Image (cartoon, rainbow, N blue to C red):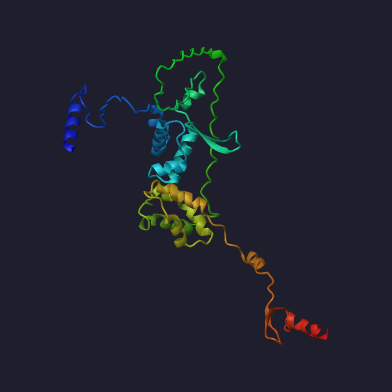
Amino acid sequence: MDTQHHNALTHALAELPGPLPPSGVIHVAIPHSRRFTIVGNHLAQHAELSLVAIGIGVHIQSLPTGSKVGIKALAARFTEGETTIASALRELEAHGYLNRNRVRLANGRMVTRTVFCNQPGAVERTGAEVVAPVVPVPEVAPVVPEQAPVPPPAPEPTPVPEESRPPVRVPSRTAPKPPRRPLPQPRELTPDLRQTASALLADLRSHAKGLVLSEDDVEELVPGVAAWLERDVRPDTIRHALTADLPQPTKHPAKIVKHRLTVHLPPPLPDAQELARVRRTVVIPLQNCDRCDRAFRSREPGHCRGCRSEPAATAA
């Protein structure tokens, strides 16, 4: 089977017009007759979308109307995790390909309506034509009894002029994401803090093979580690926070370290006065009853409640 495939591919390359390029991809384009989707190069070659976002966008565009394209549905279909898929969907939303909003149905139920636009730039221009999605209907031959009268064909509907057509409402783009939090900074970046933070960052690859940082990355991330050290966090604790439960494969190690240094920054340790306020809680000690030796809480030794009420009950 491999030999036949190789021979067929060699024959197809021989029929290509003109000389073949010395390097790079060579396209063998065979026209599709069924089951194909037209995808614009603005999506397939998008300069700002990740490869996962481009792939999910092409996949959603190839699905029929009504298909489930939520995070869990896509995670069950592909090997990428829910976090990666959610990030790719946010990329498509930010560039206008995807729109998700909550709407209320006639029965009062709230649902998420997902709209995918194959040409976001064309929607913004006036006069763009929006084609209604075609819902496939199974072809079933009608059962006509013998000698049954054939009904006359229905008259064709009168075309409505474009001036009287209702305008097509296109959902607006989602609001821009809030800016990311900056890398934490120490109150004073002393030479000792800089040296310790730089050594800790450079040594991360000894504990996690995916965290290989360049010299520029280490220089940029030194203030974040110094802020942790300034808050009396031990170096082994910082190392564990940066290397535990890393995604596999580990892509963009500098971004991962910066995110964890920013999001997981612990608060400063409380001083002695703040701890003293916590220890001011009054605790009544336990005492042993002088009569029955039962334990009870009281500031002074003596009798428990049962022994104190027993003489009164006897007198009564």
Q: Quadrant of residue 111?
A: top right
Q: How many marks?
A: 0
Q: Quadrant of residue 276?
A: bottom right
What quarter of the picture does the N terminus occupy? Answer: top left
- Viewer-proximal residue among 215 and 239: 239
Q: Quadrant of residue 313?
A: bottom right
Q: Is residue 200 left or right of residue 159?
A: left
What quarter of the picture does the C terminus occupy? Answer: bottom right
Q: Is residue 249 left or right of residue 18?
A: right
- Viewer-proximal residue among 157 and 243: 157
Q: Residue at x 40, y 46 (%)?
A: 252
Q: Residue at x 40, y 50 (%)?
A: 247
Q: Residue at x 42, y 46 (%)?
A: 81
Image location (x, y in percent) of residue 140 = 40, 26
Inspect this view and state whether residue 254 appears: yes
Image location (x, y in percent) of residue 76 = 41, 44
Image location (x, y in percent) of residue 153 = 46, 13
Image height check: is 180 above or below 9?
below
Q: Residue at x 50, y 61 (%)?
A: 233
Image height check: is 190 above or below 104?
below
Image location (x, y in percent) of residue 242 = 44, 55
Inspect this view and state whether residue 223 appears: no
Residue lying furthest front in this view? 147
Residue lying furthest right in this view? 316
- Viewer-proximal residue among 264 and 35: 35
- Viewer-proximal residue among 307 and 257: 307
